[in-house]
Amino acid sequence: MIIKNSNEFNIFPSHIGLRKYIQYYNIVFPSNDMFTSHYTLMPNACGTLSLAFDGNNVIAELWGASLSPIVLGVEPNGYRVLLLIQLSPFGLYQITRQSQAEFAGKRLSLADIDSELFHSLYQAFVMSETATNLAEACEKVLYKRMERLVVSDTLMLATQLISVNHGKLQVKEIATQTHYSERQLNRLFLTQVGMNVKCFLRLTRFNYVLKHIQTSPCFFSALSQQAGYFDQVHFDKYFKAISGVTLQRYLKTMSDFYYDGTEIYDTIFSKGD
């Protein structure tokens, strides 16, 4: 097992054949003070597979689609190595082929949910000697879960429409373009993503705002209008409702928060392609 590495963070893009389902692999070697007591994961509607070694045991977890902020605090500082497999909104459904409604917003034992996947990833985790080896070993395991594609084409179309429009759509518009009723669409999202369409729209728009705040924090007033919020008061209200903090506090302590990481993902793939 890898217990030392020259880089604290090691991010590997998934193979082109997996990119619809797996965003990237992040292999972290935490130091004692890397993560602060306020370190928080922002909700992004995506699932994650996590394996961590604390010096004695390997802890393997399935994180369902995130619906609200998760305060990790200093927990990762206690690990010697941490593997995070960041998935797309429907990636966890393709990999587990189980309804995501039961997983959303929860951290669960991977062994309890999918013992076969647990044992395969566990072996990859403990047998790999380098970060690159580990990413490649995980690729081989997850490729086997792509032999039968189960994610609905309609869901893929709907999530693409939502992404392109940064979440600024009405549910009825998506239903019209996908030729599904709103009820059918919500049932599809609940099963394959873990939330209804309205919630997915809300989180997509929120993460669009977060991404641009990171690069242009002084222009959030104009950004809130661009993102489709009625006015600054409306934007502030929704920001706090989703993030759990005021916009002012977020701007002052951005290093304490982690959001969907798509800027890392986009950068990796723009170089790789």
Image: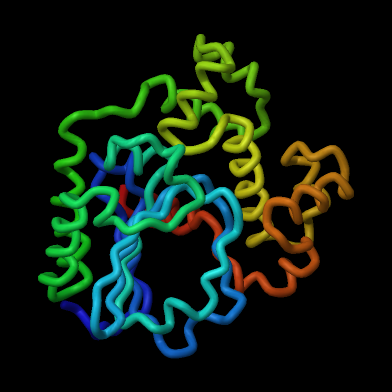
* In this picture, residue 17 sits left or right of residue 154: left
The quadrant where residue 99 appears:
top left
Q: Quadrant of the N terminus?
A: bottom left
The relative height of residue 83 versus residue 171 in the rendered view (above or below) is: below
Query: Which residue occupies the extreme bottom position in the image?
Result: 32
User: How has the structure been colored for display?
Assistant: rainbow
From this view, report whether residue 151 is shown above or below residue 107. Answer: above
Q: Residue at x 85, y 45 (%)?
A: 234
Q: Identify the image quadrant of residue 26.
A: bottom left
User: What is the x, y in percent for residue 176?
Assistant: 58, 11
Q: Position of residue 77 (x, y in %)?
A: 43, 83
Q: Check the image and name the residue furthest to the front.
A: 112
Where is 216 relative to 140, above or below? below
Give the mark count: 0
Left or right of 211? Residue 85 is left
Q: Residue at x 56, y 17 (%)?
A: 183
**In the foreground, 9 or 34:** 34
Q: Nearer the viewer, residue 266 or 155?
A: 155
In percent of the image, x 35 and y 74: which residue is there? 28
Of 87 and 102, the residue lying toward us: 102
Q: Residue at x 76, y 69 (%)?
A: 249
* Residue 187: image location, x then y, percent: 49, 24
x and y percentages locating residue 185 in the rendered image? 52, 20
